[in-house]
Structures are given as C-alpha cells and as structure tokens.
Image (cartoon, helix red, strand yellow):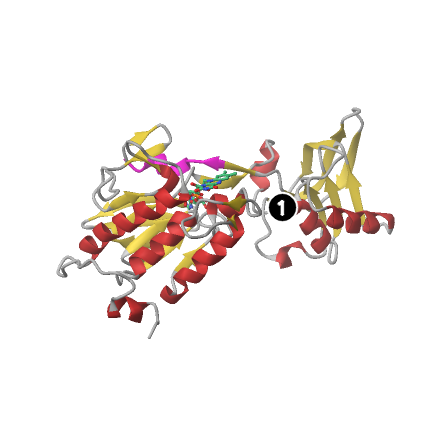
Amino acid sequence: MKKTDVIIIGAGPVGLFAVHQLGIKGLKAVVIDNLDKVGGQCIELYPDKPIYDIPAVPECTGEQLTTRLLEQIKPFNTELFLNERVDEVKQEKDNWFVKTNNKNEFTAPNIIIAGGVGSFEPRKISLKEAEKLEGKSVFYAVKNKEHFQNKKISIFGGGDSALDWALELSKYSKITLIHRRNEFRGAQNTLSELRKLEKEGRVSIKTPCQIVSLDNEKELRSINIKFDDGKTEKIQTDVILGFFGLIMKLGPIAEWGLNMDKKTIEVNSENFETNKKGIFAAGDICSYPGKLKLILSGFHEVALASVECFKRARPDEKYRFEFTTSSKKIHDRLGKK
Ligand SMILES: Cc1cc2nc3c(=O)[nH]c(=O)nc-3n(C[C@H](O)[C@H](O)[C@H](O)COP(=O)(O)OP(=O)(O)OC[C@H]3O[C@@H](n4cnc5c(N)ncnc54)[C@H](O)[C@@H]3O)c2cc1C
C-alpha cells in the first residue's frame, strides 16, 4: 500500500497542475489515470488544436500544453500510475483508501478528483465471445509488444492507432487490417506503407466490413467478417486488436457517496471540497454556481484545494501564504538557487 499526502485521480491538465500547487507547499502526491498517457482531453481529443486562452501563453496546442505542464512538475518527481482506473474509494479513520482495477492500493488524508468527464475507455466489440476472451486474445491496447509476435492478428479500426500498430506489428506477425469504411482517417503516409505491404502479400486489408462472430473452442482460431454487400469471409486469427475509439464514462466516481449534480461533483467554491471531508474535486468534473469548463478555471480550483490539503496533511503546521518569486522554501522545492 502506497502512502502519500494527496491522491490525484486524473492526469488531465488540472490533475497535472495540482501536482505543482501541492509540490510548492511541500506535499507529496501520486497521480492515477486510466489512459496510457497524461494530458486528458488535451492529448486524447485535440493534441494538434491550438488553445488561445491560457494566460500568458498566446497560443499552444493540447500536446504542447501537456508537455509544458510535465516540465513544470518535473522537480517534484511525482509517481504517475497510468493504465489504472480508480475503482474504489473508502474511508479508513482519518485517511482515504483508494484501489485501482489493477489492485494497486493507496492511502492519504486527501484525494483530489480531477476526473474531467470521466475515464476514457475503449469502445469494445459487442459480442459475448469477445467479452470472454478479453485480455487473452482480444485486446484494445498494446501494453506489451512481445505478446503480439508471431501471431495471426486481426486489427480493427480506421484511425492512427489501427494503422500505426498494423505497420509496426507487421514486422513480426501476419496482419489483417479490417475497417467498416473504405476510407481510413489515419495518416495517409502510413496507409500508403500498408498498401505497399499489401501488394507484397505481407498485410491484408479488408473494407468495408465488420466482425460478426468469433470461432473459439479453447482459444481463438478465426473470426468471421461481413462486407457491406452481404458477403462473408473467415479470417484465421489468434489475436484481435480493436481500435474503435474511446468513450467517456463517469464510471465508478458516481459510486463514492459524493453529492452529484448530473455527471459532475458538487463542491464549495471556497476550497473545492466535496460533501466528504478530504475529498476535493476540480476541473471539468466539479460543479458550483458560475462554474466554467475551462482549463484556467481548473488551475484556480486546484490552487485553492491544495491549501486545504496542506491543512489536513500537516495539522501541526501553520499554512503560510507565499509567493513563488520570493520564497526560499519554494525555490528549494523547485531546485532553484
Ligand atoms: C475539442 C476541445 C477543445 C477545447 N478547447 C479548449 C480551450 O481552447 N480552452 C480551454 O480552456 N478548454 C478547452 N477545452 C476544455 C478542456 O480541455 C477541459 O476543460 C480540460 O481538459 C479539463 O481538464 P481536467 O483535467 O479537468 O479533465 P480531463 O482533461 O478530462 O482529464 C481527466 C482525466 O481523468 C481520468 N479519469 C477519470 N476518471 C478516472 C478514474 N476513475 N480513474 C483514473 N482516471 C480517471 C481520465 O482518463 C482523464 O485522462 C476543450 C475541450 C475540447 C473537447
């Protein structure tokens, strides 16, 4: 079980800036996110789009903002737990206990929920057999490339993830790329590479078609796909990799006994505490009169929540407001002379 001062749920821009606000006050944090990367909506939904309303940054993309936030929190060496969804939150005396879907456990006097619009989860194949084989021969992400070597792999999807992995895994495995449309959304140069491999007989591309069933006894042997013209085809397959996009699910957050307003968590706008002492919510997930779903609002919210976190984590110390420009303590924490 990992002990810390604050458990931050969500590594979007607000969760990342929370690390900074806690760090300059001398508090330790861990950050947990369901995605395989940090940045939340900025990185998942609009990495290349320009943002024009971050104070003193006239223009930056979602990806650039994420990179800068990571740079800003580097001095704090904060542990990030990615690919982990927080499923359980329980009270244990004065502390909170958190458990993830990977059975990792954390305890702290404070939790900041910066969960945005909920956890991003992969859209899945809606067939019972696929559900049973998930994690064995049906996957929605590549966590370990070695599991995908010397296999017959059917990759589904038309975006960059499907194209990139089809190209990469074709080095070690036999790939069939399957998409429900004739047009692919992913990078056209990757598609051209794949078309070349198709001509050489090293990759097979099937469109416009969808999966209709899986043949498995003990393990997956083949899948059946149906084309838009009604024809069907059996494809020898050991492994399915599906990239059908992401859906956002509030998921477990709704079950932690917090006062909710539709899909957001009610907080007071003095310190962004929820109805549970020591659980704070900030960013898109919180609601209070006048709330604006903007990144800059989230930054303000975690600045105030971090003061209350300090009071709970260091009950014997008095909180003293300090400017970053002039505080020797803050300079030390940031590794500045
Ligand atoms: C297309 C688009 C353009 C935008 N443009 C702007 C703009 O120009 N300016 C602006 O200010 N805002 C803009 N926004 C809004 C901005 O992106 C959001 O306000 C911001 O991302 C909110 O940050 P957040 O950290 O609160 O949540 P998010 O960015 O949503 O991050 C939340 C994270 O929490 C994780 N999470 C949730 N539940 C769990 C759980 N149980 N366990 C583990 N992890 C969990 C999620 O996986 C996610 O990574 C835009 C949004 C979109 C979609």
Element class at badge 1: loop
According to the image, label 1 marks what residue? 137
Residue at x-position 30% and y-position 69%: 331
Magenta-colored stretch includes residue 118 = no
x and y percent of residue 220 in the render?
A: 67, 43
| Of residues 106 and 234, the one drawn nearer to the viewer in this rendering | 106
Q: Position of residue 78 (x, y in %)?
A: 38, 61
Above or below for 180 versus 334: above
Q: Nearer the viewer, residue 242 or 60?
A: 60
Q: Identify which residue is drawn at 63% across, 55% down.
A: 147
Left-right relation of 315 to 290: left
x, y percent for residue 6: 29, 54
Quadrant location of the C terminus in the rendered image: bottom left
Residue 9 versus residue 262 in the image, above or below: below
Task: Name the kind of residue labelled 1 in the image.
Answer: Ser
On the question of residue 197 being in view, the answer is: yes
Q: Which residue, as the protein is rendered here, is positioned at the far top?
A: 230
Q: Residues within 10 Å of mark 1 (few under 14, many from 20)?
A: some
227 over 279 or under it: above or below? above
Q: Which residues are magenta?
A: 248-257
Q: Is residue 104 left or right of residue 147?
A: left
**Image quadrant of ligand 1?**
top left
Left or right, residue 121 beside residue 265: right
Label tally: 1
Q: Tell me where residue 112 appears, x and y as whole percent.
A: 31, 47
Say whether residue 10 is visible.
no
Between 273 and 328, the one lying in front of the other is 328
Q: Determine the residue positioned at 51% across, 48% down.
A: 62
